[in-house]
Each structure stands twice: as structure tokens, then as C-alpha cells.
Image (cartoon, grey):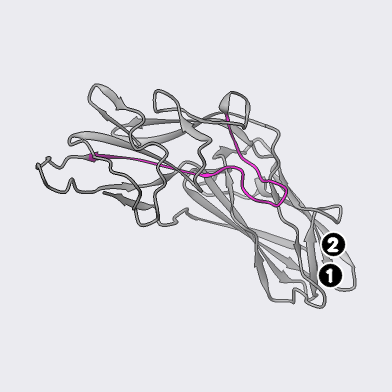
Amino acid sequence: ASRYNAEGYVDNNFFNNVSVAQDGTYEGEYYWTPGAGHEFFAVYPRDLNYALDATGKILSVAGTGPNGKVQAGTDGSGNNILKDILYDIALYDEPYVPGSNPGKIKFDLKHACSAISFSINNLSGKEIISITAFGGNGNVEIAGLYDEGNLGFSIADGLPAARWSSLADGVMSLTLPAMTVTYPDVWSHGTERTWDTLILIPQNFASRKVQMSFRVTYKGYTYDTYEVTLSDIRTGGGGYEYQAGKHYKYKIDITNQDIMCYVNIVPWIEDETIVLE
């Protein structure tokens, strides 16, 4: 967290690199400054490679993209490389009373990133044994999204804002782990499975083709291949974009003839309020 007054930032390293539990507890003693604003920046899970610059307004990530750019993508197991980045600003305006408990400060955290997830519903009338990459092996790739950019924080009309810029195609890939079942188990008709949530850089993709391709293999080792063009599916308000703080939940129905894809857009909420003492 950084604290500042009307003249600007007073201490950019206040409450720096502190692990905070979900209930708001932490080790050490820190004192909120009466009449000062406190800008809170957090990364979950904790990652000390994420840091703010000397101004307290620009994020850099050590060991990732050029010039400390933030990168999104997944590793070989489909785990997110981009962390959940949260931020808020709060004013501690309680007068200090010597000998008293300095009180608490409440942050209603906001997500600087977007989230997407996929659930697959087997309506094919067949028993599925795997969903893999288009070629039959490996993870399912989502292609066409920007995976690199700069992230800055600012205050507009007294409210905090996260602003992404210089979005680009980096070197990262965005994949979902192959879904498989172990013999003699099968993925029967009428059942649904869900991939883990992916964390993305917020972006507009109206002029880009965003697509995922995969192979569905059935019991008996027959298979179908499918392509889902995500950029053909409106994501609310008539637009084609992923917005910060929103979770885009895609549902893909596999039928005996084709597939159907829908998206449900909800606020990305995962216990975002934290109270620090």
C-alpha cells in the first residue's frame, strides 16, 4: 500500500510486500495516517515479482516480458501465469486518540484483470473419453488474444482506476488442460465438466479472431473435431471485449450433430472486501 496527502505520495513503501490472510490479519504493526489516503495494491497468490514503480502508479513484473510488461498465459499444465491483481483506495479519517486502538481501514478490492471459464456439456448421446487438442494430443489452445501489456493505476474523480495500454502479442500461449477419463470410466451423456478459470488482460477483440479448437474422442475411439470462434459471440452491450472485473462463463453443448456455445457474464467476485487493522 502507498499513503499520500494533498501534496502527493508520502510513502510508496508503506505496508510493502506484506502477506495478508483472507480475514485481514498480517504480521507486524502498521499505523494508518489520519486524513491520508491509502492506495492498496495486492496480488493473489502472493508473488514478489510484481511491484509498483517509484511513483506508485506503474506495475512491473520481474522476469517476464520486455520492460517489465505484464504477461498473461498458461504454463504446460494449464496454470495461470498472470496473477489476480487487485486494487483500491481508502481514506483513513478517524482522529488519532493517544493510547487508543488506531482502528481499521476497509478496502473494497477491484480486479484489474478479466476472467474466463468453460464448461462442456455432453449432449451427444455418446460416451466421451477425452477432449484434447485439435490434432488428438495435448492441451486445448485459445488463440487470438493479446497476452502482453502495460498496467498503470490512477485516480479519477476520487476513484481508483486500472488502465491497460500497449497491448501486444507476446510469446505466451493460453491453453486449457486436456480432459481425459481413466478406463473403464466414461463421460456419460447428460453430464458436464468445467475447466479452471483463466485470468486475462482486459481487451477489445472486435477486429481479431479469437478461436479454440479441440477434438472429442468417444468410447470406441471415434472422434469429432470442432472449432469455436469466441470473437463471434457478443460479450454484452453489443460489444466484443473482455472487461476488468468481469467473469465470462462459456458453456459449450456437444450434441450428436454439432456444438452450441453461450456466454454468461457475471461480476468477478471472490470475497473482495478486506479490512485491515
* SS class, disc 2: strand
Q: Is residue 14 above or below residue 258?
A: above
> From the image, which quarter does the N terminus lie in?
top left
Q: Position of residue 265 (x, y in %)?
A: 52, 55
Q: Nearer the viewer, residue 108 or 260?
A: 108
* SS class, disc 1: strand
Q: CA distance from mark 2 to mark 1?
A: 8 Å
Q: Is residue 94 left or right of residue 244?
A: left
Q: Residue 224: which disc?
A: 2
Q: Is residue 90 magenta?
A: yes
Q: Disc 2 or disc 1, which is closer to the eye?
A: 1
Q: Is residue 114 magenta?
A: no
Q: Position of residue 72 (x, y in %)?
A: 61, 40
Q: Position of residue 234 (x, y in %)?
A: 59, 49
Q: Earlier in the sequence, mark 2 or mark 1?
A: 1
Q: Is residue 96 left or right of residue 166?
A: left
Residue at figure coordinates x 80%, y 53% from the top left: 138
Disc 2 marks a residue whose amino acid type is Asp
Q: Is residue 189 above or below residue 66?
A: below
Q: Nearer the viewer, residue 263 or 216?
A: 216
Confirm or deny contact between disc 2 and disc 1 (CB under 8 A): yes
Residue tagged 1 = 218
Q: Is residue 200 left or right of residue 245?
A: right
Q: Nearer the viewer, residue 252 or 91?
A: 91
| Residue 153 sits in quarter | top left
How many residues crowd mark 2 within 10 Å: few (<14), some (14–19), many (20+)? some
Disc 1 marks a residue whose amino acid type is Tyr
| Residue 127 sits in quarter | bottom right
Q: Which residues are magenta?
A: 69-91
